[in-house]
């Protein structure tokens, strides 16, 4: 057994569930009402977690493997770290600070890369291809660039992994491509990849008390009790990093670090054209089809 | 320089990709507005007649790198070439297709150059911008326009201070238009050793399986599209039946694709394909703005929906209020008779 610990990082994000947008999701002024949207584990990131855990399964007999989750967001994002621990992740960090507010993808990838750098030498960074609240798919390649490591995007399947190389099948628009590379590497995982394994009953029992300092304060639990528990079981402490902790160039964070600015936003107003109502009856539908045929549309 | 650079992708068939020609057409208009030069960069392995493929769309100069190792796209060699060319030519605007290649390459370049990048723009315009706080006026910058926040708003994004201004655009969003059949430019041949590093080939392509495009939504004159309201994969069969009867193709909304009702390739909308058929039949589609962005240029739209207030009805020429599973068989029966 190799003594060197193989380090895997998963970049994950808690996102508003844009697929379950209810009527109260938009405020009167047309801005999004985040409080009305349930927060979920970004679906592609869950698949990235699965690929990370599959690597761990494949490598754990030859060397120790650690899977660390990094998430940037409000303190409640600790939820997805706990969720990851129930499925096999070892630990996680919530990177949270008001000074990150207004970050575009460039400032976000800068902060994330600074957090990854703080962990030291990393072998693989996994992330979902894109987040459902932005759909830009930019953060993965940008973190790879900032870490100065190669990137493999749209990973659909992990074909092989050993201590010095990885073989991945990528999903392209018109087919698949199989690529091989060494470490370190950043891999973004496509939505077609394997679903994440369910929670493991034993891990759920072991980790259900895992939480962060912010969560203890929010729940108004006794900090002393938690400190005592963390002293006995340090893995139950979900660490929180603020901007100072990741040693950044502060100019590159948040709004000042974001080159893109929103110039204006417009509520979508539908332009109505002449609309003909057709009754759901055989005769009216028949008339419509006849009209389309005679107009050479069909 | 205030020139515009378009990254031109090469297809499996060794042609300049449609999306790149569409971008050149749009970029030519922006270049005319800015009184600037339109540059294109092509990277590949012995591509035939790139001048003939690009000049008619108004390209003034082509930066061309040909190397036997670059028959297929690889991130790092392309990244090294593009970042070096951008530093040398200092374009004001750089545009990419929002393809699997463009979406892999553009963010890495934007990160390296520390400039802004807006994904999946549905419109690009030139205009002025006044910073709300400093009152600084930025002249003739790129408006990068896209739906945002669940599609309930259209956002205009600008990157006033950093250069180049970068954007990706999906295939089909811009119109491919010949600028001038006789337009001529110049080709600059780039030497691989000046732009690419040996270390850039650290990811080895072992195998590629590329399928010919089977589903041709974009070229279909008639599209029968289903949304989440279709209810199931089985119900989608009815759409195929109608599409076959009237010579159309089947499309879908993102919600329907995500629900597993049909293939990814059929997705129409901001994050799918943009279509302009002569007839679009929207079945069980409420009409979120991202979906409408991909089909609102259709000549005729028929909406079939149980909800009389569905947003899709506002852009439909005909609305049938009713259950798709009830209406579609009537349409099929009518056309078969």
Image: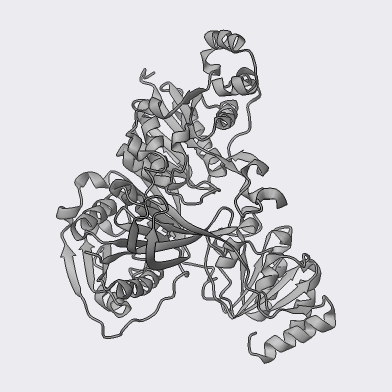
The image quarter containing residue B62 is: bottom left
- Does residue A72 sit above or below B51 in this rendering? above
Q: How many marks?
A: 0
- The residue drawn where x is 74% and y is 58% is B231
Is B258 left, or right, of A111 in this rendering? Answer: right
Q: Nearer the viewer, residue B10 or B148?
A: B148
Question: x, y percentage for residue B224?
Answer: 65, 72
Quadrant housing residue B59: bottom left
User: Is A8 left, or right, of B284 in this rendering?
Assistant: left
Q: Is residue A39 above or below residue B160?
A: above
Q: Quadrant of the C terminus of chain B?
A: bottom right
**B102 horizontally vs B285: left or right:** left
Residue drawn 24% across the image and 51% down it: B80
Nearer the observer, B248 or B296: B296
Query: Would residue A34 be seen by someone viewing this image from the given angle?
Result: yes
Query: Can the viewer see residue A166?
Result: no
Q: Residue at x 23, y 43 (%)?
A: B199
Residue B129 horizontal side relative to residue B40, left or right = right
Q: Is residue A9 above or below residue B36?
A: above
Image location of residue B251, percent across then percent down: 61, 67
Q: Quadrant of residue B318?
A: bottom right
Residue B27 location (% of width, % of height)? 34, 70
**Along the line of sight, the residue nearer the viewer: A189 or A29:** A29
Quarter of the image containing the N terminus of chain B?
A: bottom left
Q: Looking at this rendering, what residue extends furthest in the bottom direction?
A: A294
């Amino acid at each position: 057994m190799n003594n060197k610990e193989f380090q895997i990082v998963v970049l994950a994000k808690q996102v508003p569930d844009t697929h379950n947008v209810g009527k109260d999701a938009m405020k009167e002024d047309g801005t999004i009402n985040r409080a009305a949207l349930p927060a979920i584990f970004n679906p592609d990131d869950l698949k990235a977690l699965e690929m990370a855990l599959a690597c761990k399964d494949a490598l754990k007999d030859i060397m120790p493997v650690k899977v660390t989750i990094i998430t940037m967001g409000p303190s409640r994002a600790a939820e997805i770290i706990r969720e990851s621990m129930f499925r096999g992740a070892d630990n996680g960090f919530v990177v949270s600070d008001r000074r990150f507010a207004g970050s575009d993808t460039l400032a976000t990838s800068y902060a994330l890369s600074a957090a990854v750098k703080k962990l030291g030498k990393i072998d693989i960074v996994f992330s979902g291809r894109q987040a459902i609240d932005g759909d830009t798919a930019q953060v993965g390649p940008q973190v790879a660039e900032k870490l100065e490591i190669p990137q493999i995007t749209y990973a659909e399947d992990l074909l092989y992994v050993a201590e010095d190389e990885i073989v991945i099948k990528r999903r392209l628009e018109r087919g698949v491509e199989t690529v091989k590379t060494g470490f370190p590497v950043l891999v973004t995982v496509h939505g077609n990849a394997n679903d994440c394994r369910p929670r493991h009953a034993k891990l759920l029992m072991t980790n259900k008390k895992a939480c962060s300092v912010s969560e203890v304060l929010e729940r108004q639990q006794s900090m002393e009790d938690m400190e005592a528990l963390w002293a006995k079981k340090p893995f139950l402490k979900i660490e929180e990093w603020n901007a100072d902790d990741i040693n950044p160039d502060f100019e590159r964070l948040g709004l000042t670090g974001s080159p893109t600015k929103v110039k204006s936003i417009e509520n979508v107003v539908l332009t109505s054209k002449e609309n003909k109502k057709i009754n759901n009856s055989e005769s009216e539908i028949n008339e419509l089809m006849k009209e389309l045929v005679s107009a050479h549309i069909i | 320089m205030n020139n515009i650079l378009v990254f031109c992708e090469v297809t499996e068939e060794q042609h300049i990709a449609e999306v790149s020609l569409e971008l050149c057409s749009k970029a030519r208009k922006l270049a005319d507005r800015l009184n600037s030069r339109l540059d294109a960069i092509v990277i590949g392995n012995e591509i035939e007649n790139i001048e003939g493929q690009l000049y008619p769309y108004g390209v003034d100069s082509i930066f061309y790198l040909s190397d036997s190792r670059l028959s297929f796209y690889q991130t790092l060699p392309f990244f090294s070439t593009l970042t070096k060319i951008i530093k040398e030519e200092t374009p004001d605007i750089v545009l990419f297709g929002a393809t699997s290649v463009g979406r892999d390459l553009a963010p890495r370049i934007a990160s390296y150059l520390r400039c802004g990048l807006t994904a999946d723009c549905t419109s690009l315009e030139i205009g002025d911008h006044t910073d709300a706080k400093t009152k600084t006026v930025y002249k003739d910058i790129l408006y990068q326009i896209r739906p945002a926040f669940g599609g309930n708003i259209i956002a205009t994004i600008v990157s006033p201070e950093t250069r180049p201004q970068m954007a990706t655009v999906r295939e089909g969003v811009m119109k491919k238009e010949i600028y001038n059949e006789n337009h001529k430019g110049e080709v600059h041949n780039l030497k691989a050793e000046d732009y690419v590093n040996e270390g850039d080939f650290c990811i080895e392509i072992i195998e590629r399986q590329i399928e010919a495009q089977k589903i041709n939504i974009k070229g279909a004159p008639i599209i029968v599209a289903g949304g989440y309201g279709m209810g199931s994969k089985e119900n989608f069969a009815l759409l195929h039946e109608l599409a076959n009867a009237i010579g159309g193709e089947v499309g879908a909304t993102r919600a329907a694709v995500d629900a597993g009702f049909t293939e990814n390739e059929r997705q129409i909308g901001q994050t799918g394909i943009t279509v302009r058929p002569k007839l679009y039949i929207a079945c069980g589609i409420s009409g979120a703005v991202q979906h409408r962005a991909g089909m609102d240029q259709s000549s005729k739209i028929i909406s079939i929906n149980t909800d009389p207030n569905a947003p899709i009805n506002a852009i439909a020429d005909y609305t049938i209020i009713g259950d798709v599973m009830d209406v579609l068989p009537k349409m099929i029966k009518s056309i078969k008779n």
